Amino acid sequence: MMQKYSTGIAAICAVLSMAAAPAQPDLARVDARAPAGSGRFPAVMEQAASFPGYTVFAPAHLATQSKLPVVLWANGGCMAYGNRYRTFLTEIASHGYLVISIGGIGPATIEGGSEEGMPPPPVSMTAPALSNYTQLTDALDWATAQNRDRKSALYAKVNTAAVAVMGHSCGGLQAIAAAADPRIKTTLVMNSGVWNKGTGGLPGAPVTKASLAKLHGSVLYIGGDASDGAHENSRDDFERITSIPAVWAYPDGVGHGGTYFEPGGGTFGSVVVNWLQWRLKGDRAAASLFSGPDCGLCRDTRWHIARKNLK
């Protein structure tokens, strides 16, 4: 989970210099790339002058949007580069979501690539953290304030009653920690799960198996096959969850890195969008991918799925 990246001091300095740059209008486009994503609302990556240290993904034309559910994202490695999962998060936003990622915008070279494996536990919880799970709920606080601010481009555009928290690898542990917030409606834990030995969590993601009791609403665990270092952690988490709707699913041939960097986020992008459409927007067609005796993932020979408490 705590991946090592070779971005170097120059990249870190670049991020710091961006944070110190003169303020721009809120939700300013960061480059001239065309809006992207396969959804009905092509999306863009933005930064908000009022909220440095985060990256926002949203439909390009907010004026034509109904209220947007909120998706809070924590990165693999608990890293603080908000554009690391740009392709995947843009895809989600294009289906009508306000996506907020921990971290400002780093160098373009950080977008995409592969994930390294997880460190063996235990990991000292006093080690320095690249980010903290509390930044996820801070992001929700900001979105709520923007929704109430008549001067904001997001005024009356945010559905703060429909909120998902999710993350990859170390970020998945941060999502579990943040999911205790009563405003969270669904949690997505991706290529991740709490260790049942050592500390259970990682710096910036202080969780144990007891943290699972604080999950509410619903939860989706999605990950890789047995080659994924988090496979058994996620399976064990799922087995311990008894009181809320829960799904554990994974495809053959996918490891710890998932499919986030493939066009549209790959097969993970499609599954995640359907989960959000169901759990945050009540889309019954999307629900059929997970629920029912003949569910979409049940029929897909590439996928394995276990379910409990679904309605």
Image (tube, grey):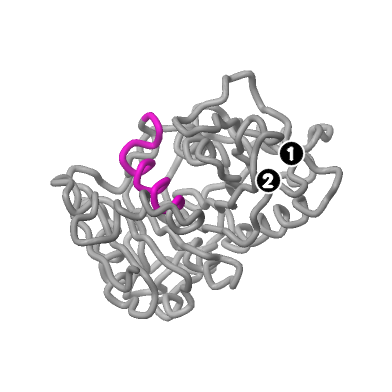
Query: Alpha carbon of mark 2 to alpha carbon of mark 1: how far?
Result: 7 Å
**Position above or below: 275 against 20:** below
Please tell me which residue is depicted at 54% across the width and 39% down the height of the picture.
Answer: 93
For disc 2, the marked residue is 53
Disc 2 residue type (three-letter) = Gly
252 displayed left or right of 40: left
Residue 171 in sight: no
Q: Quick one: label 1, few (<14), some, or many (20+) residues within 10 Å?
A: some
User: Any magenta on residue 240?
Assistant: no
Vertically, is 217 above or below 31?
A: below
| Amino acid residing under circle 1 | Ala
Quadrant into which the C terminus falls: bottom left
Residue 29 in percent (x, y) is at 68, 28
Residue 57 disc label: none
Looking at the rendered image, the quarter that the N terminus falls into is bottom left
Q: Position of residue 118 (x, y in %)?
A: 34, 54
In front: 298, or 197? 298
Q: Which residues are magenta?
A: 263-277
SS of the residue at dot 1? helix
Q: In percent of the image, x 30 and y 70: which residue is there? A: 238
Quadrant assignment, res 56: top right
- Are circles 2 and 1 on residues that touch, CB within 8 Å? yes
Please name the residue that numbered disc 1 is placed on. 19
Q: Position of residue 214 (x, y in %)?
A: 48, 77
